[in-house]
Amino acid sequence: MTGLDGLVIPGGESTTITKGIESAGLEPALRAHHDQGLPILGTCAGMIVCDAEHLGFIDATAKRNAFGRQLQSFEADIAVEGIGDEPLRAVFIRAPWVESHGPGVEVLSSYEGHPVAIRDGSVLACAFHPELTEDPRFHAIFMAMTTSSRSRAKEEAR
Amino acid sequence: MGHMAEQATFRLKTGLAEMLKGGVIMDVVTPEEAKVAEDAGACAVMALERVPADIRRDGGVARMSDPAMIKGIQEAVSIPVMAKARIGHFAEAQVLEALEVDYIDESEVLTPADESNHIDKYAFEVPFVCGATNLGEALRRLGEGAAMIRSKGEAGTGNVVEAVRHMRAITSGIKRLAQLRPEELAGAAKEHQAPLEVVREVAAAGRLPVPLFCAGGIATPADAALMMQLGAEGNFVGSGIFKSGDPARRARAIVEATTHFNDPERVAAASIGLGKAMPGLEIGDLVAEDALLQNRGA
């Protein structure tokens, strides 16, 4: 896991992903990536894995399956800070929400009063699945974070 | 819900299956087994009253599980809980939907309730997975609204040969379809006895519009790696785990082999010291006894 500009921790089942990180011994490499200030995008289960009760990359706790089981899964148009006025179609599958967060956490989007997209320093996290729609604007926020982190690293290397 | 909110769209139905890709879905019959499966790294569990090997041995009519057992399993684990309904038994499916299971498997492992019709899966909000032995069957199930396809294999045998045959039939069928000219697709639809619109969609994309998993006969980590290399996007394992000598260990090993299917050293390491695999059955003997489950609900 060296030479990466950014890391995506995708959706799936957070229990399964956590076990996988354990059994593959990936935690030190993930921590090293985060400690260098390199960007991370955590979506759905990826957001849970990044939270204070798991890897602790965000000063926030995510509530698992907060919106319910598969029957309560939904899609909706949501406003997201930093992507323009046009709402984003967001797909929530057995989705978590952010239950609590520290003062340094920026809430980029909320749904029915619960934060569903946040940024904490180099970590961007969302409760929905931006990869299941064609709209690239949420990924663009992450791409901008990786690009600026890479330019910063180049500056420092000079 | 406001904001143009919608539920039960096809994207939400297939979306959950997308999240299970690369993972293992394990058959469990008790909350304790479900916990073992979750701890071993299963991405979902399939709640049923008897594993296929026992259904095969005991005979009788195999039905949907006891709702109390399904609820117990839902309370025991936080990963998705799937459950099986008999082919064509839409009232069992209604009960499973009322129980809020995350996926319904309209399964040939249970005794079919309807000899000529499958469930109209578009009528449900909960998504369905269905088995197939070849591309035509897969396309027909998609036409009925399935949001995930699995090979049928031959459940409860611990013999992977049928799953291999079905997976190869499905993937090579897709490749052939993708090479056809547009005017040849109507003929292909007729040959596959499948709706033309689904045939067109698969031909254009060169893949099924939903995730394709393997089921039916996986007993070892190498079996799991084999199926992934043959094009499965994840594995269902039934009797193979809880009919083996050391279920927790074998479950972990099959998860490891499914994730790292292209890394023989890891599959080898995972295969060491697992104890006895489930005893297997010869397919030829089942043919002689007319005991193949895969012929149900074509």
Image (spheres, rainbow, N blue to C red):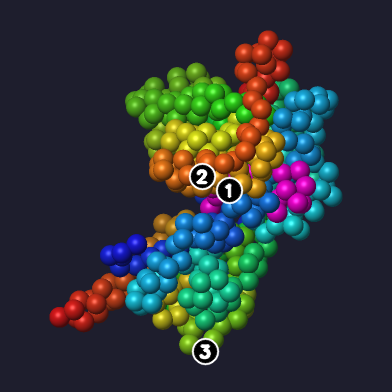
Q: Earlier in the sequence, mark 2 or mark 1?
A: 1
The chain to which mark 3 is attached is A
Type of amino acid at the residue the image marks with label 3: Pro
Q: Is residue A90 left or right of residue B279?
A: left
The residue carrying mark 3 is A103
**Circles 2 and 1 in contact, beta carbons < 8 Å:** yes
| Residue A59 rendering spot, x and y as whole percentages | 52, 81
Name the secondary structure under disc 3: loop
Question: Does residue A129 show up?
Answer: no
| Residue B121 rendering spot, x and y as whole percentages | 66, 40
Q: Is residue B136 left or right of residue A154?
A: right
Quadrant in which the N terminus of chain A appears: bottom left
| Marks 2 and 1 belong to one chain | yes
Does residue B27 belong to the magenta stretch? Answer: yes
Q: Residue at x 42, y 72 (%)?
A: A31
**Quarter where residue A142 is shown:** bottom left
Type of amino acid at the residue the image marks with label 1: Arg
The residue carrying mark 1 is B252
B150 vs B56, nearest the viewer:
B56
